[in-house]
Amino acid sequence: MTDLVTYADLTTSPSGLPVNPGHHLAMAAWCYGPDHVVTRSLAEARPELLAAVSRVEDRLTEPVMQALRAGMAVAATVA
């Protein structure tokens, strides 16, 4: 269950659009600044957070993944 919640958090922008997990983490760091405890915590947890995303993606079917990737591409052009 934790992996699924992590996946949902890291693949969704604050406005609800699909987003790349690495972009989500980078935006959080930008918002909080380099010395903030949130930025430092996310940097330390990054490998495990991205591993959780990978575990969920590994369990999704290919048609679902294609739809998610398409949504992320569209969201990137809107953002």
Image (spheres, rainbow, N blue to C red):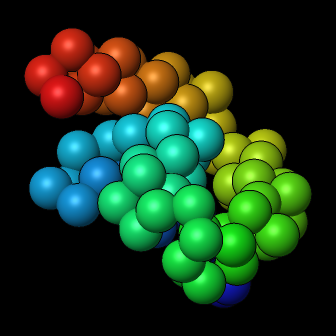
Q: Is residue 11 visible?
A: no
Q: Is residue 27 visible?
A: yes
**Can you tell which quarter of the image residue 4 is in?**
bottom right
Q: Is residue 24 positioned above or below 36 on the image?
A: above
**Can you tell which quarter of the image residue 52 is in?**
bottom right
Residue closer to the observer: 67 or 76: 76
**Can you tell which quarter of the image residue 14 is in?**
bottom left
Q: Position of residue 79 (x, y in %)?
A: 18, 28
Residue closer to the observer: 24 or 68: 24
16 with respect to 11 (left or right): left
Q: Is residue 14 positioned above or below 20 on the image?
A: below
* Quarter containing the N terminus: bottom right
Q: Is residue 5 positioned above or below 20 on the image?
A: below
Q: Position of residue 74 (x, y in %)?
A: 24, 18
Question: Going 46% across and 62% down the picture, which residue do you hit?
Answer: 33
Question: Going 30% across and 53% down the picture, which residue do you hit?
Answer: 13
72 with respect to 53 (left or right): left
Question: Going 42% across and 52% down the picture, which residue do you hit?
Answer: 30
Residue closer to the observer: 8 or 24: 24
Q: Position of residue 9 (x, y in %)?
A: 46, 67
Q: Is residue 10 positioned above or below 68 on the image?
A: below
Question: Going 63% across and 27% down the picture, which residue do you hit?
Answer: 62
Count the labels in the image: 0
